[in-house]
Amino acid sequence: MERIVIHSDLNNFYASVERKLHPELLGKPLAVCGSKEERKGIVLAKCEMAKRYGVKTGDTIWQAQKKCPDIVIVPPHFDEYMKYSRKVKAIYARYTDLIESYGIDECWLDLTHSTLIFPPFENKFITVDGEKHFTDEYLRFLGDTIRTTVKKELNLTVSCGVSFNKAFAKLGSDLKKPDGTSVISQLNFKSVINPLPVEDLLFVGKATKEKLRGMGLNTIGKLAEADDDMIKRIFGKFGETLLRYARGEDEDEVKHMDDKREYKSIGNSCTYREDITDITRIERLLYVLSESVAARLREAGQGTADTVHLWVRFDNLTDFSVQKKVRHTVLCSEIAKHAFELFKANVKPPFKVRSMGVTVSGFDNGISQITIDESSGNYKKLEAVERCVDEIRKKHGYDKLQRGIIAAEPEEMKNDIKNSHLIKPANFEDRGGDDDK
């Protein structure tokens, strides 16, 4: 049976919630920005009015104000965003229990077998070449029902993409923003999808886009028609995913709302009050970040990680990211050591570091082979110590137990990055805000 998958995307989510909190801002251009005093002053989200002035996610505050002199700058309130995110998902749950989050403001819903509270609809099906399909009108009706319910009850707008797989549903939700429904069905997908830029496809980032365009594959249709062997040779296993998505062959299931979240990566970053110019301080601050990352990794129950990523931004706002394969680990000491090695290999003095981020990926879900070092007992002892530290900090506070290397950074002794950065406005690869395109 043809699937019905909806991707719902809350429009300008952070800015929309801020307007609910501050009705007096209605009708004014608005941007949600990080703290200027802590040098995190970039645009995390903006309203439609600010967008028309050219304000973009990632702009500095002064850039936003130059483009739009009357713009109102407000700080983020992540606890409120979480509250409204839960309210929206509670509405989705009236229609299906197959709800898979894709960040705080996006979800996939599978309505294929849903019989919950949708009003009756007469022309659900059409037969083409002997095969039964849902009509575009019915699919649009489902998306519109969810969209209008959210708008009526919470005064938040949603863009919905309705399709027969997750990749096309995600793409569809971007086609009519704000507050629209797009249908990409099995009967019309080639005419809708094929002319679109290749970078509109799920998981096609900047580097992949440049490679594909360099091969002359500038549209999704051209990628769909590309030679399989060539794509797999250049992109490896990821090439198979690209071809499946472009051809409408994505069969990934929408997870149940109670399924445990599977993490692709776990990380954290920090912007410093002053530029860091001393290599010894870099090492200490990487330990602070790695404490957060290791604790989150242990808490997530994803096993160990085999890849450490480092991101660095300099005082002139240029940045770079680099990664390396490592022995499977959950240890802060090992993550910090690898991050520091990456820094030394890629950054030569003099330097002025404004921000850094550490991320781990390549989780084994607890099934990696035991190494010689682990079997000797050393690794397991260190892991037990770090887990014990986790428990002590939960009970008595983060600052009650610290590594000696952090002692030279008094301000960092109480910098519980893990619990003070509960919601990241962006992932490691894309430092934007909420959807806010």
Image (spheres, rainbow, N blue to C red):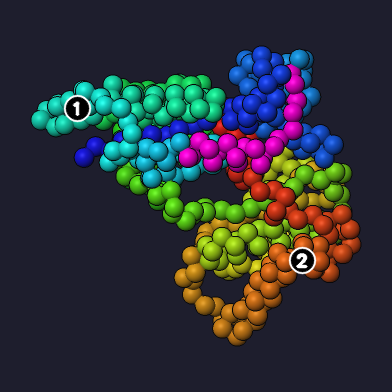
319 in relation to 222, above or below? below
Position of the C terminus, as image quadrant, is top right
Position of the N terminus, as image quadrant, is top left
* Rendered residue at 79%/68% (across/down): 401
Disc 1 target residue? 125
Q: Is residue 41 magenta?
A: no
Q: Residue furthest bottom?
A: 376
Q: Nearer the viewer, residue 397 or 225?
A: 397
- Occupied quadrant, residue 98: top left
Residue 112 located left or right of residue 293: left
Q: Are marks 1 and 2 in contact (CB under 8 Å)?
A: no
Residue 73 is labelled as none
- Percent from the top left, x then y, of residue 351? 83, 46
* Rendered residue at 65%/76% (across/down): 384
- Percent from the top left, x then y, of residue 29? 69, 17
Classify 10 Å Cα crowding around label 1: few (below 14), some (14-19), many (20 and above): some
Q: Nearer the viewer, residue 304 or 414?
A: 414
Q: Which residues are magenta?
A: 71-90
* Rendered residue at 50%/42% (across/down): 102
Classify 10 Å Cα crowding around label 2: few (below 14), some (14-19), many (20 and above): few
Residue 392 located left or right of residue 243: right
Residue 396 is labelled as 2
Q: Secondary structure at mark 2?
A: helix
- What amino acid is found at the position of numbered circle 1 in the picture? Phe
- What amino acid is found at the position of numbered circle 2 in the picture? His
The main secondary structure of the magenta stretch is helix
* Rendered residue at 30%/39% (across/down): 114
